[in-house]
């Protein structure tokens, strides 16, 4: 932008999160924070904004969003799960004459739908398109859609505006190191939006972002690193740098990341993860059913014993949180019990178990649509809906089995067995020299409430029993025990909410390939033809 061009006033809005598995809504007051993690999209877009423009960041998870700011453009972000709120905000802002633009996973997966609610749609990553749009807006008329011709190189991407995030109001912070995953899981939208070719920032840049989070008060950082196992040389470099960084500062930050199960086969990576103080990793294990993994092309999980791989992480002091899916074609009604048994055996306390959803633009979506088994659009939340007619069970069996699985997973005794088992068996972690902060004390006060029956006698009994076992057998893990006790409340309350609201869709036809052949006596469905006339 040249000096004479006008400065634009830009408002970037992150919509309110609806309740979901990871929003931990019921324990936010206990932890004394407003939200678990900040959504990194808008701080990233703010960072892409050339100097000279005014940017206001509004996160509806922290404060109500002002809809009458005098700005030239309003940006909205969000995932499919945010759609309802995005639509409301867009409608309200446009009614006030604002130019509304939209980007992020929802707009990227459903650009045509997004175009009906916003003036300008950004498809995919915005490193190149956002500055181009601002130039177009400042100097003339912007286009209705921006989509980068190539995936941006992240090596010299500007730094997200961490200075605009009030880290004290979040439980943890997020930084992004890489985008793009080399695997090809059939249901995955990440490879649709970000591609299969991994692109990463420089290691120094990652350290600078981590440092910025530390300076902002973060004690836990989630590293978005889609391609961890895709380039092991880079992964080793990253972990070595983070380990050196932590060692020099007394490990002030616990790191988390999402990575693939095959990392467990690499002893050096496991050692480095521990030395860099990675305390939790989220792994898309998906299923203990090998046929389901093969069907989903999740080949990286089919090479060895899954339980043994999980245990190897645990032996290195690293907790595995698992993403699990039911409803693959290869799944029969036995899968629910198999999933629950697997979680117990592998000692995975936090299991995000969802029903398979066909997300728009993925190969799975195209396949089930071609097979006539698509029940409608995806909702972006695998806890409340599956839009696929299952192959080897009825939709009713899928929903009933899924309900049972959720109840089994977060049953008090089953969870205690997994979490205490994990804590007693896990290997040593790096010793953090971090001092108790005011925020820790606030959280401790909130946690104490669970022990004195503020949340009912059942929870108080659960909390005392859990804690007593850890104090007796591994007192060094007391702090983590408290964290597991609190997390159970979030998981339990959320799954109870799901159980109370989950409704199967009406249609329950069987997949023709596996269903017994029956002759329908009804009229052929001609409604669509009549309507088309
Ligand atoms: C960190 C993370 C989380 C964290 C933090 C969530 C949060 N609020 O940020 C936690 C663990 C809490 C979480 C929870 C969930 N998540 Co999540 N999460 C991620 C993850 C790993 C990284 C997201 C991130 O930080 N990206 C970095 C930013 C910078 O990328 P970006 O948003 O794409 O932004 C770029 C462009 O899209 C664009 N852009 C974005 N917004 C805008 C706006 C404008 C105006 C413009 C111009 C451009 C633009 O510019 C940016 C720079 O190029 C992704 C997977 C992945 N690897 O990407 C999944 C992902 C985003 N999550 C997903 C889902 C489903 C969920 C949950 C619904 C899961 C559940 N059932 O509980 C919840 C929803 C929580 C909520 N209500 O917000 C999906 C969303 C897509 C979908 N299919 O629904 C993803 C893609 C993973 C997946 N494939 O399943 N998640
Ligand atoms: S490993 Fe994860 S991110 Fe990569 S393709 Fe599979 S599901 Fe997607």
Image (tube, rainbow, N blue to C red):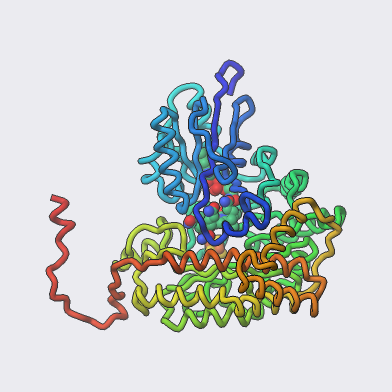
Please state if 260 lies on the left or on the right of 110 as rendered: right
> On the image, which quarter does residue 301 sit in?
bottom right
> On the image, which quarter does residue 411 sit in?
bottom right
Quarter of the image where ligand 2 sits: bottom right
Q: Seen from this angle, which residue lies furthest top? A: 4
Query: Which of the image's four quarters has the N terminus?
Result: top right
Vertical position of residue 503 compared to residue 532: above or below: below
Point out residue 487 in the picture as x, y percentages from the top left corner.
64, 65
Query: Is any atom of residue 195 visible in this view?
Result: no
Nearest to the observer: residue 208 or residue 488: 488
Point out residue 354 in the picture as x, y percentages from the top left corner.
49, 68
**Residue occupying the point 51% across, 73% down:** 406
Point out residue 107 in the picture as x, y percentages from the top left corner.
45, 46
Vertical position of residue 440 compared to residue 409: above or below: above
Please state if 435 lies on the left or on the right of 292 as rendered: right
**Residue occupying the point 41% across, 32% down:** 94
**Residue occupying the point 66% across, 45% down:** 155
Query: Is any atom of residue 236 visible in this view?
Result: yes
Nearest to the observer: residue 171 or residue 187: 171
Numbered circles on residues, count: 0
Point out residue 223 in the picture as x, y percentages from the top left corner.
67, 55
Vertical position of residue 65 compared to residue 230: above or below: above
Please state if 316 lies on the left or on the right of 122 as rendered: right
């Amino acid at each position: 932008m040249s000096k004479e061009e006008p400065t634009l006033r830009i408002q970037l809005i992150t919509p309110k999160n609806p309740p979901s598995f990871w929003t931990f809504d019921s324990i936010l007051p206990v932890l004394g924070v407003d939200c678990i993690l900040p959504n990194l999209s808008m701080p990233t877009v703010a960072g892409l904004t050339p100097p000279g423009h005014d940017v206001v960041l509004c996160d509806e998870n922290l404060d109500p969003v002002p809809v009458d700011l005098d700005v030239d453009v309003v940006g909205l972000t969000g995932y499919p799960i945010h759609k309802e709120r995005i639509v409301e905000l867009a409608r309200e802002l446009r009614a006030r004459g604002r130019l509304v633009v939209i980007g992020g996973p929802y707009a990227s997966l459903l650009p045509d739908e997004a175009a009906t609610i916003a003036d300008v749609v950004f498809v995919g990553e915005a490193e190149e398109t956002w500055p181009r749009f601002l130039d177009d807006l400042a100097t003339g008329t912007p286009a209705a859609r921006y989509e980068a011709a190539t995936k941006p190189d992240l090596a010299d991407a500007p730094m997200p505006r961490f200075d605009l995030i009030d880290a004290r109001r979040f439980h943890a912070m997020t930084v992004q190191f890489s985008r793009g995953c080399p695997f090809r899981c059939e249901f995955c939208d990440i490879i649709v939006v970000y591609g299969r070719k991994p692109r990463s920032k420089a290691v120094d840049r990652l350290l600078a972002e981590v440092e910025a989070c530390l300076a902002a008060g973060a004690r836990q950082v989630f590293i978005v690193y889609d391609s961890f196992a895709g380039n092991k040389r880079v992964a080793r470099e990253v972990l070595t740098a983070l380990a050196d960084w932590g060692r020099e500062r007394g490990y002030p930050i616990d790191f988390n990341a999402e990575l693939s199960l095959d990392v467990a086969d690499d002893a050096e990576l496991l050692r480095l993860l521990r030395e860099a103080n990675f305390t939790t990793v989220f792994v898309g294990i998906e299923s203990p059913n090998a046929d389901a993994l093969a069907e989903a092309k999740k080949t990286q999980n089919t090479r060895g014993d899954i339980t043994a791989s999980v245990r190897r992480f645990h032996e290195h002091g690293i907790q595995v949180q698992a993403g699990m899916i039911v409803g693959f074609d290869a799944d029969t009604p036995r899968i629910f019990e198999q999933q629950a048994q697997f979680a117990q055996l592998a000692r995975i306390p936090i299991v995000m178990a969802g029903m398979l959803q066909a997300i728009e633009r993925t190969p799975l979506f195209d396949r089930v649509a071609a097979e006539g088994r698509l029940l409608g659009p995806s909702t972006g939340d695998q806890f409340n809906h599956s839009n696929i007619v299952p192959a080897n069970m009825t939709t009713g069996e899928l929903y009933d089995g899924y309900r049972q699985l959720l109840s089994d997973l977060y049953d008090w005794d089953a969870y205690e067995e997994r979490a205490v088992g994990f804590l007693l068996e896990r290997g040593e972690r790096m010793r953090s020299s971090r001092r108790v902060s005011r925020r820790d004390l606030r959280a401790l006060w909130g946690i104490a409430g669970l022990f004195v029956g503020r949340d009912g006698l059942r929870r108080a009994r659960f909390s005392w029993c859990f804690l007593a076992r850890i104090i007796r057998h591994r007192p060094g893990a007391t702090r983590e025990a408290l964290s597991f006790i609190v997390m159970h409340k979030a998981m339990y309350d959320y799954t109870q909410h799901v159980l109370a609201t989950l409704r199967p869709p009406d249609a329950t036809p069987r997949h023709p390939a596996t269903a017994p052949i029956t002759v329908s006596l009804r009229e052929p469905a001609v409604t669509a033809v009549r309507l088309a006339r």
